[in-house]
Amino acid sequence: MKSEHLEQALERIDTRRKQAITVNDEHFREVNERIPEIAEINRQLFQTSRSLMQIIRSGENTAERIEKLKHQNQQAQLMVRRLLAANGYPEDYLEVHFTCPKCSDTGYYQGTYCTCLTTLAAQMATQELNRNAQVNLCSFDSFDLSYYRGHKTESGSDCYRAMEIIYHFCKEYAAHFSKESPSILMYGSTGLGKTHLSLSIASAVLEKGCSVLYDSVINFLRQIENEHFGRDKTGNDTLSLLLECDLLILDDLGTEFDTPFYQSAIYNIINTRMNRCLPTIISTNMDFNGISHKYDERITSRIFATYVNHHFVGYDVRILKAQQKAGRR
Ligand SMILES: Nc1ncnc2c1ncn2[C@@H]1O[C@H](COP(=O)(O)OP(=O)(O)O)[C@@H](O)[C@H]1O
Ligand SMILES: [Mg+2]
Ligand SMILES: [Zn+2]
């Protein structure tokens, strides 16, 4: 876990703790004003804790006297709960409600980090990595199938029909996403909506609360390289995040440089996630031939065999949009 994200997460958990206590203080004030019986009991309870300290200090019959006080205390609290209910309040209205009851919003549990802290830190790391991606800009609703109408593939089949199948597949995939979902390979020439659809999946799956990492292969590899060779001093561990997140989206595979470091990083990512049965979405402008030429057979055979393959077809939507715009002028 990265220290920077742990610190941010701790700060946020500490804020939650302070807020919970402030809310509790307000509840006390409100109830003390509205229900005088409870105000009186609270005063006595306060006295009890002072007597307790006196007993401990005096050291006389300590155990016995503490037991007696404890009992009185429990009776008083029971009474408070009854009075609250009788006055239309929830019985636990005067208890502090922490977001994480396990660690009372301290971030620590049984001598180590509480899961609420590590989960929050991982979410923050994910948010940071996705910050540059335009995850929010692309949605299934803004995907327009009419751009594929009237176009035929080289082999003469209908582009609209092919893209309609891909669109519905992606929508269903996002709606029913789980860690058991298959991996997807989106391939086809530029401007056909591969990035648009993979970002649409990303935002839908993020909304479900899953951890999703999205970026271009180039950006991921650069970041991993900088961290690996110590040029990045933040203590981030992008590679671990890529290997662990629920869904990883690698955009534009094939645009990175051919270096042994990159090749082995790509192999490591794809292979490790496959072995862990975690879904990955890869998009690329290369076709089967291109992929087979550029990458080791160990990677390509596994991708072709286990990923759901979607061939994007049609005419560059960027150009079509530009033509429409020009036509309207
Ligand atoms: N079917 C579509 N409907 C609406 N906009 C689209 C569609 N396909 C692509 N676009 C838009 O066209 C541009 C290029 O698409 P993109 O998804 O980046 O293509 P690719 O990743 O296949 O190269 C983006 O701005 C994208 O939002
Ligand atoms: Mg793209
Ligand atoms: Zn906790």
Image (cartoon, rainbow, N blue to C red):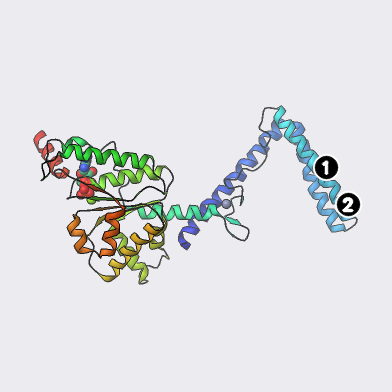
Residue sitting at the far right = 61
Residue 72 badge: 1
Name the residue tied to disc 2.
64
Residue 32 percent location from the top left of the image: 71, 35
Amino acid carrying label 2: it is Glu
Q: Is mark 1 within 8 Å of ligand 3?
A: no
Residue 188 percent location from the top left of the image: 19, 50
Q: In the displayed structure, does residue 96 sit left or right of residue 220?
A: right
N-terminal label among 1 and 2: 2
Residue 45 percent location from the top left of the image: 78, 43
Q: Secondary structure at mark 1?
A: helix
Residue 184 badge: none
Give the crowd class for mark 2: few <14, some 14-19, many >=20 residues within 10 Å.
few
Give the crowd class for mark 1: few <14, some 14-19, many >=20 residues within 10 Å.
some
Residue closest to the eye, 95 or 114: 114
Compared to residue 27, the image places residue 261 above or below, namely below
Q: Where is residue 162, by image quadrant? A: top left
Residue closest to the eye, 263 or 18: 263
- How far is mark 1 from mark 2, CA to CA? 13 Å
